[in-house]
């Protein structure tokens, strides 16, 4: 773009910004009303002219598929050409495969870094070792108590589930029914 055109465009933009300055009270948008709630910014939708014409011309696409299949086969007589190159045939094969079976996913090999990833446990261990010894001891004791309380709580919950589902008199050390099928439970 020449300097004269660039200056003209720059001056035009500057003038339009200076003139508006908020004094007109106009809101954004072409209509000056801005984006109104509940109204589409494109009420007519996407123009369908070219796409509609292409669909009407091609129909269901059978002619396109037949043409690309003829290119793939290298059928010079049907195509009315002297020669069909390998490149054209490969492009036809790709076109047919993509439309018949879908595009192949793009697979990218990501090289692994020589450096190992940061391990959270290593970071936590390094941080804990940086604490003063008395604080480390107190923190360790607290964590042990929390762990033991969690185990006791889990055991109590399992015991409650067992009591709710097993018949009266059941004990983990003796079966409800003896293995020989007798009705009495040995003491």
Image (cartoon, helix red, strand yellow):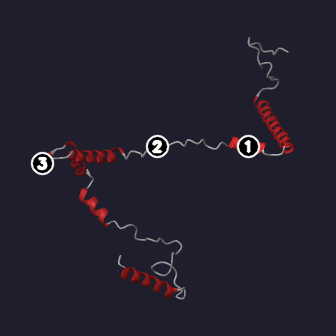
Q: Are marks 2 and 3 in contact (CB under 8 Å)?
A: no
Secondary structure, mark 1, is helix
Q: From mark 2 to mark 3, how far is it between C-alphas?
A: 42 Å
Residue in the foreground of this view, choosing between 120 and 35: 120
Task: Give the residue at mark 3.
Answer: 82
Q: Crowding near pointer 3: few (<14 within 10 Å), some, many (20+)?
A: few
Viewport quadrant of the N terminus: bottom left
Left or right: 51, with 71 as reference point: right
Q: Secondary structure at mark 3?
A: loop
The spot of residue 150 in percent (x, y) is 80, 38
Measuring from the top left, give residue 164's x and y in whole percent: 78, 32
Q: Residue at x 39, y 79 (%)?
A: 6
Which corner quadrant of the image does residue 45 belong to?
bottom left
Residue that numbered label 1 is attached to: 126
**Mark 2 or mark 3, whichever is nearer to me:** 2
Task: Find residue 74 and report its horizontal and vertical position in percent.
Answer: 18, 44
Residue denoted by label 2: 109
């Amino acid at each position: 773009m020449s300097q004269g055109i660039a200056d003209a465009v720059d001056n035009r933009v500057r003038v339009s910004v200076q003139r508006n300055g908020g004094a007109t009270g106009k809101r954004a948008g072409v209509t000056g009303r801005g984006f109104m709630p509940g109204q589409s910014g494109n009420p007519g939708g996407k123009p369908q002219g070219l796409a509609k014409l292409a669909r009407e011309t091609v129909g269901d696409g059978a002619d396109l598929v037949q043409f690309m299949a003829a290119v793939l086969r290298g059928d010079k007589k049907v195509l009315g050409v002297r020669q069909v190159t390998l490149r054209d045939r490969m492009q036809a094969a790709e076109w047919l495969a993509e439309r018949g079976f879908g595009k192949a996913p793009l697979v990218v090999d990501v090289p692994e870094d020589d450096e190992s990833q940061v391990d959270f446990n290593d970071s936590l261990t390094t941080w804990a070792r940086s604490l003063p010894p008395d604080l480390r001891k107190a923190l360790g004791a607290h964590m042990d108590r929390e762990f033991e309380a969690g185990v006791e709580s889990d055991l109590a919950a399992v015991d409650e589930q067992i009591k709710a589902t097993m018949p009266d008199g059941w004990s983990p050390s003796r079966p409800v029914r003896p293995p020989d099928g007798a009705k009495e439970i040995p003491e």
